[in-house]
Amino acid sequence: MAEELEVCVKAATGAPDKLGDCPFSQRVLLTLEEKQVPYNMKFIDTSNKPDWFLQTNPEGKVPVIKIDDKWIPDSDVITQILEEKYPEPPLATPPEKATVGSRIFSTFIGFLKSKDPNDGTEQALLNELRAFNEYLKDNGPFINGEKISAADLSLAPKLYHLKVALGHFKKWSVPEEFTYVQNYMKALFSRESFQRTNAPDEQYIIAGWFPKVNG
């Protein structure tokens, strides 16, 4: 049995003993879940970070994980180390597929913050989703084919943010015509690993996006 790893993740706003809505924290938790590595979460109030946390991690960002008595920040670095240390099941995404869908999140944020319906931000998001739908149609159901990989675990939390935030603030959802994206989201969000590492929907709205949309 692998040793239990300590992982610092964002705490929920108003509920310091519950998981918050950080997609990068969730990406690391998903990786641990899919690899069945035991872990213990430490919830960090990101608006009032404890001294011990800042001493181990001066940048103060989550997630951070303790591996071999060393605290390691950055979800990219953490997931890479987890892949090397716990190779089964393999989650590495081939380099040529690793950036598939990677621009969806930034175009979603652009559209979410937009106050002008004619500024092209919605179209930019639709273009990214359409391209992703075409990719999945030919290569799916996941980014690396039949099996889930690191790229999916990075994208899944971001797509959940998109679903909840755009549904709430814009009454907008991924168009039905993008069948492969719809099926992809359903498959990921229904996985046990996702259910176990997901914050309540209100956290995404209250804490995550309300200040950004109304700021």
Image (spheres, grey):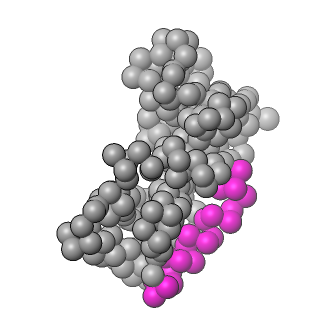
Residue at position x 55%, y 12% in the image: 52
Q: From the image, which quarter does the N terminus lie in? A: top right
> Residue 30: x percent and y percent?
61, 49
Residue found at the very far left of the displayed protein: 119
Which span of residues is magenta-colored? 176-196
Residue at position x 52%, y 34% in the image: 63
- For the stretch drawn in magenta, the main secondary structure is helix
| Above-or-below relation of 215 to 95 | above
> Residue 99: x percent and y percent?
36, 59
Q: Nearer the viewer, residue 96 or 166?
A: 166
| Above-or-below relation of 8 to 112 | above
Residue found at the very far right of the displayed protein: 1
| Above-or-below relation of 148 to 25 | below
In the figure, residue 114 lies in which quadrant?
Answer: bottom left
Q: Nearer the viewer, residue 141 or 94?
A: 141
Q: Based on the picture, tell me whether residue 5 belongs to the magenta stretch.
A: no
Residue at position x 28%, y 62% in the image: 115
| Total marks in image | 0
Q: Nearer the viewer, residue 51 or 156?
A: 51
Residue found at the very far front of the displayed protein: 214
Q: Left or right? Give the position of 92 relative to 42.
A: left
> Residue 8: x percent and y percent?
58, 29
> Residue 171: x percent and y percent?
47, 72
- The answer, for residue 160, to whether it is visible in the render is yes
Residue at position x 71%, y 50% in the image: 196
- The answer, for residue 144, to whether it is visible in the render is no
Q: Based on the picture, tell me whether residue 183 belongs to the magenta stretch.
A: yes
Q: Left or right? Give the position of 143 relative to 214.
A: right
